[in-house]
Image (cartoon, rainbow, N blue to C red):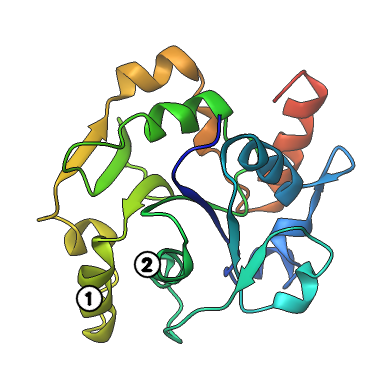
Amino acid sequence: MKYNCTGVILAGGLSTRFHGKNKALLQIHGKPILQYIYEVYQALFDEIILVTNNPLEYLDWDLEIVTDIFSIRSSMTGIHTGLFYAGHPYVFVTACDTPFVKRQLVETVLAGIGGNAEWIIPKTSLGMEPMCAVYAKQCLQNMETCLRNEKFKIQKCLRKVPTKIISEKKLLEIDPELISFFNINTPEDLSRAELLVQGGLP
């Protein structure tokens, strides 16, 4: 089933702990991290947008490549850009360094689309997960205002928009280890990811 939603992947990090290597293209068990996400997105979305300021690195990928509208390094900048270019009224957003995002978890978040909710976001014991969430086009104006005023905290920016929270209890039913939120920040994370795949994930 394809959803009335655009899949957005943010690939704008500096990768300082990987000496500038592109995290999206780091390999886990012989496959780029981006490929793990792309395969999930292909099953769900008819439009996939990659937000990056290094577009030449992705010319071989079958997706729409866009660059940040605001020249400010923040995750909100990427989300704003994905929303701006999206052809659907909603976007689902994740980062390029989350290889184990589960299709079922994404579908659970997408199921929250409807009614007046403009922001559909998972919440765990560690807090909100804005990098695994749905944003409606109506969020654009709020984000633009915040970016122009150099306020980069997503939760503060969107605190007044109609929000639907996906509870940890519901998330655990689909993803008992909450592995969908695991991201590759360090070489140690990359080694752990390799061991997870060798052990049967995803």
Q: Nearer the viewer, residue 162 or 90?
A: 90
Q: Which mark is residue 76?
A: 2
> At x 71% / y 36%, what residue is drawn?
193
Q: Amino acid at mark 2?
A: Met
Give how far across and how far down residue 5 sits, in percent.
45, 47
Give how far across and how far down residue 36 sits, in percent.
72, 40
The answer to whether 167 appears left or right of 86 in the picture is left
Q: What whole-number distance in Å separates the C-alpha atoms at marks 1 and 2?
A: 9 Å
Q: Amino acid at mark 1?
A: Cys
Q: Is residue 127 visible?
A: no
> How many C-alpha atoms fall within 10 Å of the one at disc 1: few (<14), some, or many (≥20)?
some
Contact between marks 1 and 2 (CB within 8 A): the answer is yes
> How many C-alpha atoms fall within 10 Å of the one at disc 2: few (<14), some, or many (≥20)?
many
Q: Helix, strand or loop at disc 2?
A: helix
Q: Is residue 186 above or below residue 11?
A: above
Q: Nearer the viewer, residue 145 or 141?
A: 141
Q: Quadrant of the N terminus?
A: top right
Q: Which mark is residue 146?
A: 1
Give how far across and how far down residue 28 sits, in percent.
80, 42
Q: Is residue 154 above or below residue 39?
A: below
Q: Is residue 108 visible?
A: yes
Q: How many marks?
A: 2
Going by the picture, which residue comes out furthest to the right? 30
Q: Quadrant of the C terminus?
A: top right
Going by the picture, which residue comes out furthest to the left? 160
> At x 58% / y 60%, what residue is drawn?
49
Q: Is residue 34 above or below residue 71?
A: above
The image quarter in which residue 117 lies: top left
